[in-house]
């Protein structure tokens, strides 16, 4: 009878003890995830990886800025060329009109 009582007590105590152990393991794992650094990786290694990633972001940003500057320079160059062509076309139109007026009036008069 005593052995049966001990066996019943052990079975009754097993469930809460198992639940407590599993709860402790789950909370310690959750804490490690919250901190974000695995146990195997030293903090200096994590900081080094972060510095490398920041350098890559800086390099990418610099490349984008250089491309943007080249595009802005090219568009201003094309805009300047377009303006020069428009000026030449206006001058050519003026010359054409003057030639047409001279031909209509009988040509240039020679001075003697």
Image (cartoon, rainbow, N blue to C red):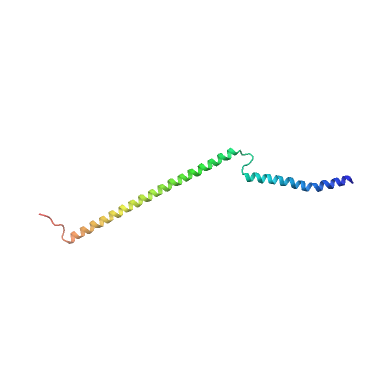
Residue 16 screen position, x and y as percent: 77, 48
The residue sitting at the bottom extreme is: 104
Which residue is depicted at the point 33% across and 51% down? 81
Instruction: Specify whether 33 is left or right of 89.
Output: right
Residue nearest the observer in this picture, 50 or 79: 50
Residue 42 screen position, x and y as percent: 61, 38
| Quarter the C terminus occupies | bottom left
The residue sitting at the right extreme is: 1
Which residue is depicted at the point 35% across and 51% down? 78
Residue nearest the observer in this picture, 99 or 62: 62
Q: How many marks?
A: 0
The residue sitting at the left extreme is: 112
Which residue is depicted at the point 71% across and 45% down? 24
Residue 92 screen position, x and y as percent: 25, 55
Residue nearest the observer in this picture, 89 or 23: 23
Which residue is depicted at the point 45% across and 45% down? 63
Residue 100 screen position, x and y as percent: 21, 60
């Amino acid at each position: 009878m005593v052995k049966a009582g001990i066996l019943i007590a052990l079975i009754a105590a097993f469930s809460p003890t198992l639940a407590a152990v599993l709860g402790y393991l789950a909370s310690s794992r959750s804490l490690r995830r919250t901190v974000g650094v695995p146990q195997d990786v030293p903090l200096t290694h994590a900081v080094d990886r972060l510095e490398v990633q920041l350098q890559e972001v800086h390099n990418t940003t610099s490349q984008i800025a250089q491309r943007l500057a080249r595009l802005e320079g090219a568009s201003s160059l094309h805009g300047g060329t377009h303006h020069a062509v428009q000026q030449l076309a206006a001058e050519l139109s003026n010359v054409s009109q003057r030639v047409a007026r001279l031909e209509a009036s009988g040509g240039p008069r020679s001075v003697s």
